[in-house]
Amino acid sequence: QSVLTQPPSVSAAPGQKVTISCSRGSSNFGQNSVSWYQQLPGTTPKLLIYDDDKRPSGIPDRFSASSSGTSATLGIAGLQTADEADYYCGTWDSSLSAAVFGGGTKLTVL
Amino acid sequence: QVQLVESGGGVVQPGRSLRLSCAASGFTLSRHGMHWVRQAPGKGLEWVTYMSSDGITQNYIDSVKGRFTISRDSSRNTLFLQMNSLRAEDTAVYFCARFSGSDRSGSWDSWGQGTLVTVSA
């Protein structure tokens, strides 16, 4: 069981906004920042958000994120059918030299 | 252009070995922490192992400790994953991924296309 807990699935209509949560468990694992990844069907993961809330160049501002210590949240506004994918949060713990990913959330755009 | 290309996957019997390669281009492997992440069929991402940029530190998820070894050849700019005593539960697509940024705020900013390892009798 991952120490980063995500809902298995979320859904919303095109044009709407959806949020995906990523909750740290009681473990002290990963007090570092959270990053978010999009994995379209049959493709490789792609970095969406790094350092809790920063977007790499080329990522639309429809994608946003925030963090509040024990949880992080990814927001996707103006949903498009092309956004249907699995979304993962992840964090690196330098003191443990180990990493963990959330279980992933499947986004369905109805 | 940063690129990671994995190879070496295939079908292997339980207990046998396999070595995966990850050829990097567009950047110098030894300037980044490098990771292997796997994804079992229909499942989520699972971090497997890490090598620090200076090559001194490696770590592994508990389920592969003592069986898997991460290494690199800086002259070839290539990362490896030696997998011994393979088990059915090791069946997955294996991705190599580049870690960029600081320890506190870094992320995996480049991923390979993955190579499928199937462990089956």
Image: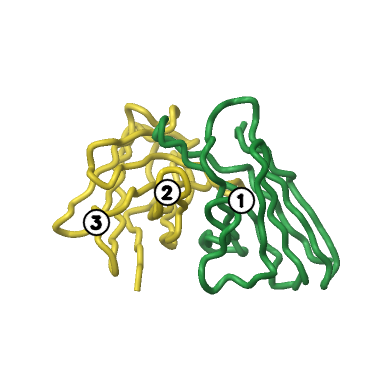
Chain colours: A green, B yellow
Q: Chain of mark 3?
A: B
Q: Residues within 10 Å of mark 3 (few under 14, many from 20)?
A: many
Q: Chain of mark 2?
A: B
Question: Do callouts 2 and 1 mark residues in contact (Cβ within 8 Å)?
Answer: no
Question: Do callouts 2 and 3 mark residues in contact (Cβ within 8 Å)?
Answer: no
Give the alpha-carbon distance from disc 2 to disc 1, as whole Å.
Answer: 22 Å
Q: Residue shown at 60%/48% (left/top)?
A: A89
A41 horizontally vs A11: left or right: left
The residue wearing badge 1 is A88
- Give the residue type that dot 1 points to: Tyr
- Give the residue type that dot 3 points to: Thr
Give the alpha-carbon distance from disc 2 to disc 3, as whole Å.
Answer: 19 Å
Q: Position of residue A23 (x, y in %)?
A: 68, 38
Residue reaching furthest to the left: B75
The residue wearing badge 2 is B117
Q: Secondary structure at mark 1?
A: strand
B106 horizontally vs A69: left or right: left
Of residues B40 and B55, which is closer to you in this image? B55
The residue wearing badge 3 is B78
Of residues B56 and B19, which is closer to you in this image? B56
Quadrant position of the N terminus of chain A in the picture? top right
Q: Secondary structure at mark 3?
A: strand
Q: Residues within 10 Å of mark 2 (few under 14, many from 20)?
A: many
- Give the residue type that dot 2 points to: Val
